Image: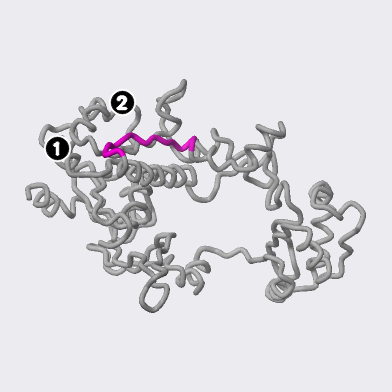
Amino acid sequence: MSGPLAGYVVVDLTRALAGPHAAMMLGDLGARVIKVEQPGSGDDTRGWGPPFAGSESTYFLSCNRNKQSIALDLKDETGRATLEALIRKADVLLENFRAGVLDRLGFTTARLLELNPRLVVLSITGFGHDGPEAGRAGYDQIAQGEAGLMSLTGSGPDDPQRVGVPIGDLLAGMYGAYGVVSALLERERTGRGQVVRTSLLAGIVGVHAFQGTRWTVAGEVGRAQGNHHPSIAPYGLFRCGDGHVQIAVGSEGLWQRFCAEFGLDPQEAGLATNAERVAAGRRLVELVEAAFAPFGADELLRRLAAAGVPAGRVRSLDEVYEWPQTRSQGLLIDVEHESIGEITLPGPPLRFFDPAGPDGEVETTRTDHAAPPVLNADEEEIRSWLAG
């Protein structure tokens, strides 16, 4: 396999989404990821559907590319012995059991690092590994609510909404993978592994961004306010002659160009500065939508582009995946699945380049991707490798 993590071995004990997403990110970077699953049923997400492709859940397919699968009963002595052998040869182990479960199986942190002092362990929970609510189960929508994200999402303060993807799981997985790579880098200096911990709560709080400092510094509690930015204006979704467009007027220079394009007065009382425009609220929205009303979305987007004002449309997912720009960025990959045949998957979001190639910059991004495995597909190969 190619990629920055080629040669590293990852043992993935996780299930559902946060942990599998982290492991998939490491696999995308070239690591050999061995997914350990429960015999018979496998990862919970194998049954999460519809939709299914044949017998395969599309949910499972979304977060398990570039992995191998082996089924082990960790309550059985033979299964635990195989896991010990995997740990001895691994660089990374990922787990997202509830607190104490791995300890009860005989794999305390001390035992893991006794088996392999260079092992990097990533542990993901719902609300943290300690503290007064450490034992709570972690499910994405619950975490989105508890971590404040739903209070910021929706048409208004009385309309809390979850984000349309399990963003708490995904963020925990992304932060987890980031922590693993950092720990591997530190291991190059120290020769020792360590434990990396994160949670759905931490992942969401970690991206509160300006909404966080809005409270911690200014004492102001952010609330959902639909499709308009709380601190920049005009910035959001606006009606036009045949639909909607989005604009981002993020500077006074852009405001000047925007007004010139649509015959507005940039110095109009109460709208001359960004702070005034934010405070104007509905008045500004009505002004912009009146200026947009004569134009269809396509013409409006052309005019905005000509004026240098960032703008865009709202695409459905089928439109996103049919968009040539999406394919051009390597965001779709074609793989051969053992039971389904050829399928297309959303691809990795990173690309790598060697700037010093013989003919200039050369892309070195991994292209030899593997489809998500069927349950226990790689037992024979993995056991042969362990015995070698």
Question: Residue reaching furthest right?
Answer: 269
Residue 133 vs residue 249: left or right? left
**2 and 1 marks in contact (CB < 8 Å):** no
Which of the image's four quarters has the N terminus? bottom left
Circle 1 is placed at which residue position? Answer: 79
Q: Quadrant of residue 372?
A: bottom left
For the rendered model, the colour scheme is: one colour
Circle 2 is placed at which residue position? Answer: 100
Q: Which residues are magenta?
A: 190-202
Per the rendering, the mark at residue 200 is none
Where is residue 72? Give x, y as percent. Answer: 17, 41
Q: Callout 1 environment at 10 Å: few (<14), some (14 to 19), or many (20+)?
A: few
Q: Nearer the viewer, residue 139 or 130?
A: 130
Residue at 79 percent across and 61 percent down: it is 255
Question: Residue reaching furthest left?
Answer: 387
In the image, is residue 253 above or below residue 173?
below
